Image: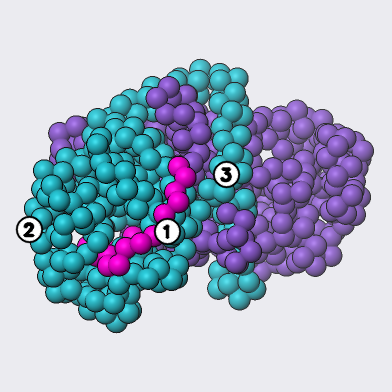
Chain colours: A cyan, B purple
Amino acid sequence: MSVSLPSDFNRIAIIGVGLIGGSIARAVRTAALPTHIVAYDASDAVRARVRALGLADTVAETLPEAVSDADLVILCTPVGTFEAIARAMAPHLKPGAIVSDVGSTKGSAIAAMAPHCPAHCHLVPAHPVAGTENSGPDAGFATLFKGRWCIVTPPEGTDKTAVARVCAFWTALGSNVEVMDAQHHDRVLAVTSHIPHLIAYTIVGTASDLEQVTESEVIKFSAGGFRDFTRIAASDPTMWRDVFLNNREAVLEILQRFNEDLTALQRAIRWGDGDTLFNLFSRTRHIRRTIIDAGQDTPRPDFGREPATPSEAETK
Amino acid sequence: MSVSLPSDFNRIAIIGVGLIGGSIARAVRTAALPTHIVAYDASDAVRARVRALGLADTVAETLPEAVSDADLVILCTPVGTFEAIARAMAPHLKPGAIVSDVGSTKGSAIAAMAPHCPAHCHLVPAHPVAGTENSGPDAGFATLFKGRWCIVTPPEGTDKTAVARVCAFWTALGSNVEVMDAQHHDRVLAVTSHIPHLIAYTIVGTASDLEQVTESEVIKFSAGGFRDFTRIAASDPTMWRDVFLNNREAVLEILQRFNEDLTALQRAIRWGDGDTLFNLFSRTRHIRRTIIDAGQDTPRPDFGREPATPSEAETK
C-alpha cells in the first residue's frame, strides 16, 4: 500500500505498556516523531516502571486522563480487555480521534471495540506481526517493528484518511504495511502464528509430563530441536489465552488440517514409507529460504546462536 | 561421567563429511589434538570440497583406504547407510580399532553395526546432540559441540577403556558427555528432537497446502512464530527420513501422547475453557528459563535475531 502522508499525530495514548506498548513508545522516540506520548497501564508497578524508564512524556494515572486530547489511542493490552477499555474510554475521546490497537485477533477486536466507538471517532485496528517471548515494559525495544509487517484491518466504510494516517504511523516506525479485512487476517495469523504457538505450548507440556524421560533430560538434550519450541512457549500466557478464545473458528479449522497431515506422517512412519517422509522433508526446505530472502528471518545458521564472543562461549 | 584419559587417538577416520563430520574435523584441529585426520565421503564432489577446505590430513579415495590403520572410525552418514558401511569396512579394520558414529537413533545404529563389527574391535556408538539446519562440508564449524551434550551408548559388555576413550574424545571437542543405554537414548531423543522435527515439518507442509492463505502471505507474516518452525524444517531430508524409519516405536509412542494433549487443548478452545489454556501456558514458561540456565540456549530475546549491526538492519 502506498502511503504519502507523514505521521502527523500531535498526541498519542498508549494503553497498556508491555512488550508492544513499550516498543511503540521507544520507536516513536527513535523515529523522532513530533508526538507527545501519553502512557497508561492499569498496574501501579508498570506505571512506576514506565516513569523510571522515561518511556513517555506523560504517564497518566487514569484511563480518561490518558485518552483525553489524544489524536491516536492504541490499545496494547490483551484482546480480552478490549471491550471494557473501549466502553470506559468512549466518553473521553475527542472528536476526530482514531482508536487503534495491536491485538493478534482482529475480528474479535472489532466486535469488542466498534459498538463503543463514538460516531465522531474512527476505528482503525492494526496488528504489528512482531514480538519476542519476553513481556513487560522492560522487554520493549525501538527496532522491534523494523522490516516486519503491520496489518491494518479497517471495518468497511472506515474513513480513508484515518486509515492512511495509521498506515503512515506504522511506516514511520519501520514497518511494512498491508491492509486486509479482519476475517482474512484471522485466518492468515492462525497459520503463521496461532497454531505454531499452540503446538509449541503442547509439545513443551507433553515433554514435561512424561514418566520415562525426566525433565532434567529434556532440558539437557534440548539442543536437538526442542529448545526452539520452548522460546515460543515462553510467551505471555494471558495474551495467548485471549488469542485462542478470540480466534476460535480459524484456529480450529487450521488445526484440523494440521491433524490430518500429522496423521498421514504417523502412518508413513508406522508403515516404513520413507518416500512420503522424504518428499515432505524436501518440500519444506525452500520455504525457509524464501522467508530469509523476504527479510523475515536471519540467514545465520541456528539463528546465529553460535556463541558470538569468546567470553560468551566461556560461560557455556 | 568423570573421564580422566586425555584423547589419545593417533589416527581417526571420518566417514561422511557433512555438517557433523566437517565440524568434528574442524574441532579436532581447534582442540589441537595430536591426531591424523582421514576423511572419506562417497561423493566425488564432497571429497573435492574437503580437499579444497583442507579439513583433513588425508582425503581417502575409498572406504577401505580410509579405515585401515585408523584407531577410531566415526560414521557421520545417515543412519540408513550404517549397515552397508559397517559390512564393507569390517575386513579392513585393525585390531583394537574403535568403531563409533554420530547417528541420531542408537538402537538401530547398534543393530546395523554390531553384527559386522569384528571381535578384535570395539563398538562405541555416540550421538552429539548438536547441529544446525544447514548441511554439507561447508556448514560445519569448530564450536558446534561446545557446551552441548554427547550421549554415548555402548552395548552391554563393551570394553570400559574403549568407552572412556570415546568419552575423552568428545570432552576434548568441548562436549559434556553422558553414557546411557540405547533404548533410553531413543526415547529421550524422540521427545527432545524427533517429535519437534516431525511437528515442524508437518506445520510447514500444512501451511504451504492451504487454499485460502497464499504462500506469499505465510512468508510475509511468518515473524509471528511460524518462521521458528521453518528453521527446523530446513534440516537434511535424508537424515531425517532415516531417523523416523529407525526410531519408529519411540516416535509413535510420544506422538500418541502429543496427540492426546493437543486434542485436550483443541477441546478447551472449542468450549472457551480459558483456565485450561492459561494453566498450560504458565507452566511451560519455566522450562525455557531452565534451559537457558543450563546453558543450552541463548537468553537473548528472539534468539538475538534483532539486527546486530546497523548495516545488517539496513539490508532488511
Contact between labelled residues 2 and 1, with CB atoms less than 8 Å apart: no
**In the image, which disc is placed on residue A6?**
1
Left or right of A273, for residue A27: left
Which residue is located at x 29 percent, y 49 percent? A162
Query: Which of the two marks, 1 or 2, is nearer to us in this view?
Result: 1
On the image, the x and y values in percent for residue A274 come to 59, 22
Q: Nearer the viewer, residue A240 or B154?
A: A240
| Residues tagged by mark 1 and mark 2 found on one chain of the structure | yes
Q: Nearer the viewer, residue A224 or A149?
A: A149
**Looking at the image, is mark 1 or mark 2 earlier in the sequence?**
1
Q: Write down the residue under mark 2.
A: A91
On the image, the x and y values in percent for residue A120 come to 15, 51
Q: How many residues crowd mark 2 within 10 Å: few (<14), some (14–19), many (20+)?
A: some
Q: Main secondary structure of the magenta part?
A: loop
Q: How many residues crowd mark 3 within 10 Å: few (<14), some (14–19), many (20+)?
A: some
Above or below, B293 against B190 in this view is: below
**In the image, which disc is placed on residue A294?**
3
Above or below, A190 against B2 in this view is: above
Amino acid type at image mark 3: Ala
The residue range painted magenta reads A1-20
The quadrant of the rendering that contains the N terminus of chain B is: bottom right
Q: Circle 3 — which element?
A: loop
On the image, the x and y values in percent for residue B197 come to 50, 38
On the image, the x and y values in percent for residue B261 come to 29, 37
**Residue B177 picture quarter:** bottom right
